[in-house]
Amino acid sequence: MKMKLLCMLAIATLSFAYVQAQTVDEIVAKHVEAMGGADKLKTVNTISTERVLAVQGMEIPSKSVIVVGKSLRSESTVMGNAMVQVLHGDKGWKIMPAMMGGTGEPEDMSADEIKPLFGQLDPFGALYNYQEKGNKLELVGKEKVDKKDMFHFKITSKDGVVMDEYLDASTYLVYKVVSNVGGQEGELVFSDYEAIEGIKMANTIDITSPMGAFTMITNKTVINGQVDEKIFAKPAK
């Protein structure tokens, strides 16, 4: 009798795990489809954006270029001073103005500075191709967030970074991501989605971090535009 109960319990546990996995994959599949579909996302090689960062009454223009999975360059102008961050392969360099504690000259980034940038090489988020990326997903449940129904996922990346991601249950697009990197918690809220060449992208991102709260507004996005590899090379001093 005891053995029979144990077998029934094991079967029930396995059945629950199967149903949960099936539910996770069904939700993720709808999320990928809402973004434009896997076939469309696979065709994206480069993304270039022009944005304005609104913080403390200032508007800071910025540009970024991503070669998906390979390289990133972001640059902005703060009170007439250029600020540049570049990730190319596993190497990174930056230009930080003196007013922000830098030298104003190109200098190598430390490993700690480079690590957070790797996530930006993947513009479609942790759920897309999550198994190939080595991400582990847990569907926490369906919750109300800002009076909207959300699917709440807990995601653990292959390098141990844990984040909470909330999908709008009506659109299946990402609404909010909460992460903790190096003991510092940050929150991103995505809105104003627009289809650009069939791919849904958020034009507004509200960011809360230990450095404060600010809003990033996208004015222009170009998908699969030509990118000169020279922009990722560290200039000589």
Image (tube, rainbow, N blue to C red):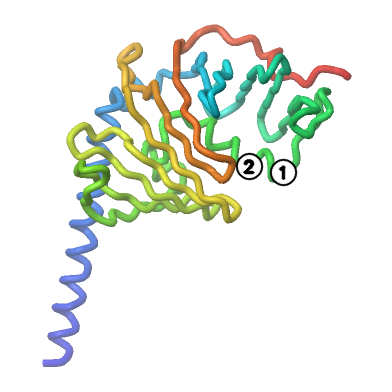
Q: Position of residue 8 (x, y in %)?
A: 14, 78
Residue sitting at the far top: 226
Is 179 positioned to the left or the right of 168 in the image?
A: right
Q: Position of residue 179 (x, y in %)?
A: 47, 48
Dots 1 and 2: beta carbons under 8 Å? yes
Residue 197: image quadrant is top left
User: Residue 13 versus residue 143: which sits nearer the camera?
Assistant: 143
Instruction: Work out whether 227 lies above or below 98.
Output: above
What is the number of the mark on residue 115? 2
Whether residue 80 can be seen here: yes
Query: What secondary structure is marked by label 1?
Result: helix
Q: Position of residue 123 (x, y in %)?
A: 46, 29
Disc 1 to disc 2, C-alpha distance: 6 Å
User: Residue 203 versus residue 172: which sits nearer the camera?
Assistant: 203
Kind of residue at badge 2? Lys
What is the number of the mark on residue 111? 1
Instruction: Identify which residue is drawn at 59% across, 41% down.
Output: 211
